[in-house]
Each structure stands twice: as C-alpha cells, then as structure tokens.
Image: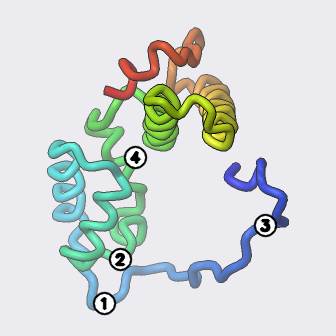
Amino acid sequence: MARMYKSRRGKSGSSKPFVKEAPEWSNTDAAAVTQLIIDLGKEGHSSAVIGTILRDQHAVPNVRLVIGKRIGSVLAENNIGGTYPEDMMNLMRQAVGIINHLGSGNHKDLHNKRALEITESKIRRLANYYMAEGRIPAEWRYKRDELRLMVE
C-alpha cells in the first residue's frame, strides 16, 4: 500500500531468516510474556511499542516464537485496545496533523494538500477492508470534520 502513489518500482532488501523456535538466550516463559503484554497494553502502549519494549528490556526478540500468537491478538483476547485498528488510527493521526498544518496559515501548501488526499484514500481503503473483516461497523464513513473526535 505504501508504494501505490510512488513512481518507484518497489523496495529491495533482505527478508528475516526462517526460524521455528526462539533462541536459547531469550525469555521463553509464555505466561510471563503474555502477562507483560497485557500489563503494557493496559498502560496504553501500542503493539509496536510493546514489541520494542519486549525486545529491548525483556529479551524477547519475537513474540510469535514464544507464545505462538501476535501481540495484537493477545491484546484483542483481553479486550485491550482502541475502537479502531492500530494502523488505521495511525493514518487518522497523520491526517489530523496535516489538517492542522493546512489550517494554521499554510493553506497554499500544495504538497501537503496532496499528502492529505493520499492519506484519506488510504484510510478509506483500510476502512473497506476492516468493514469486510467485521472489525469496524459496516455503516462507518470517513468524515474530515469528525476526524479529531475519533483520534482523541
């Protein structure tokens, strides 16, 4: 999705090596890692921040190798998280920032007007996907006036 509006051909780079089990130096106590995820989620951290904290402070390089589930699914099982999926909420925050920029005397900034259109398009496409998955209501619509209320 990130390269839909770019003139480049794609991204190059290496992929993660295939590993079936966590390394022996890592924390492999599934119950303790699950409890850490729940505690960090209740503090208000996003799943990306939780993964970074587990990696840097608790020696868990890959949660899926320890628990067998993603961080987001552990949070969802315990009803922790917002009303909207994390990636969609990040795009909404980005749109609010661009709207604030354009509204504070930068109304002639054509590059950010285009960036706002692209961001809103991404939000709408994600919304269609999440409506089909049943993670947001089917009657949900993106409205620029109500965006600040959804984000805050």
Q: Nearer the viewer, residue 28 or 80?
A: 80
| Comes first in the chain, label 2 or label 4 | 2
Marks 3 and 1 sit apart, C-alpha to C-alpha, by 36 Å
Given contact means CB atoms under 8 Å apart, are the residues at marks 1 and 4 in contact?
Answer: no
Q: Position of residue 145 (x, y in %)?
A: 48, 13
What mark, if any, has residue 96 been given in the picture?
none
Given contact means CB atoms under 8 Å apart, are the residues at marks 3 and 1 in contact?
Answer: no
Amino acid type of disc 4?
Ser
Marks 3 and 2 sit apart, C-alpha to C-alpha, by 27 Å
Q: Write down the quadrant of residue 81 in the picture.
A: top left
**Farthest top residue?**
139
Image quarter where the C terminus lies is: top left
Q: Position of residue 109 (x, y in %)?
A: 62, 38
Task: Tell us which disc is closer to us: 3 or 1.
Answer: 3
Amino acid type of disc 1?
Glu
What mark, if any, has residue 24 been given in the picture?
1
Given contact means CB atoms under 8 Å apart, are the residues at marks 3 and 2 in contact?
Answer: no
Secondary structure state at the residue bearing disc 1: loop
Pointer 4: what residue? 73
Q: Write down the quadrant of residue 116 in the picture.
A: top right
| Comes first in the chain, label 1 or label 2 | 1
Marks 1 and 2 sit apart, C-alpha to C-alpha, by 11 Å
Task: Tell us which disc is closer to us: 3 or 2.
Answer: 3
Secondary structure state at the residue bearing disc 4: helix
Task: Tell us which disc is closer to us: 4 or 3.
Answer: 3
Label 4 crowd (10 A; few <14 / some 14-19 / many >=20): few
Marks 4 and 3 sit apart, C-alpha to C-alpha, by 29 Å
Pointer 2: what residue? 61
Amino acid type of disc 2?
Pro
| Comes first in the chain, label 1 or label 4 | 1
| Comes first in the chain, label 3 or label 2 | 3
